[in-house]
Amino acid sequence: MTTPRLFFRICFSVMFIALTSGFAVKAQTTVFKPKDAALFKTIAHMDSVMFNAFNNRQLDVMKGLFTADVEFYNDGKGVTGYDATIAGFKGIFENKQAADLRRDLLPESLEVYPMPGFGAIEMGTHRFTHTENGKPVIGVMKFVHIWQLKDGQWKVSRVVSVGH
């Protein structure tokens, strides 16, 4: 015979599982809808410009995509300014062991928000891949780029990179 206490525990457990399962499914199926579709397309394009340059080791292109006062926050390396950020890219590009390092945006993760009077906030997840000791190494990290629109040019003024 089931006691009232046991009955309520079973009901509570079933309700908890049903509710949390519903939230988990909803969170996985939510698709980002940008407030400004044209801005979303522009920033997605700028992201591809930046990382095509990264993947093709085009340091001169990379130099032109950051503001002179950029701040790059990295949970693995700390905070760097423009010179150290560019030096970091140069070091990666010259590192023979990282010759096949590439970055790919996970397109479904991309979110872009307008920042009136300044530019846009880009958030997403990207995957870095390279070979180490003959084996593929994959790192998946989250990022935030603060894009500034100044004199008709989009440049990144702040970067937050986490998950290293």
Image (cartoon, rainbow, N blue to C red):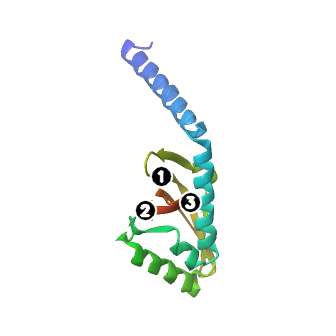
Measuring from the top left, give residue 110's x and y in whole percent.
57, 50
Q: Residue at x 49, y 45 (%)?
A: 114
Marks 1 & 2, CB-CB < 8 Å contact: yes
Q: Earlier in the sequence, mark 1 or mark 2?
A: 1
Picture quarter with the N terminus: top left
To which quarter of the image does residue 136 belong? Answer: bottom right
Relative side of 152 to 13, left or right: right
Residue at which label 3 appears? 126
Marks 3 & 1, CB-CB < 8 Å contact: no
Relative side of 5 to 105, left or right: left
Crowd rating for badge 3 (residues with CA inside 10 Å; few <14, some 14–19, many 20+): some
Residue at which label 1 appears? 119
What amino acid does circle 2 point to? Answer: Ser
What amino acid does circle 3 point to? Answer: His
Cα distance between the residues tagged 3 and 1? 21 Å
Q: Earlier in the sequence, mark 3 or mark 2?
A: 3
Residue at which label 2 appears? 157
Residue found farthest to the front: 151
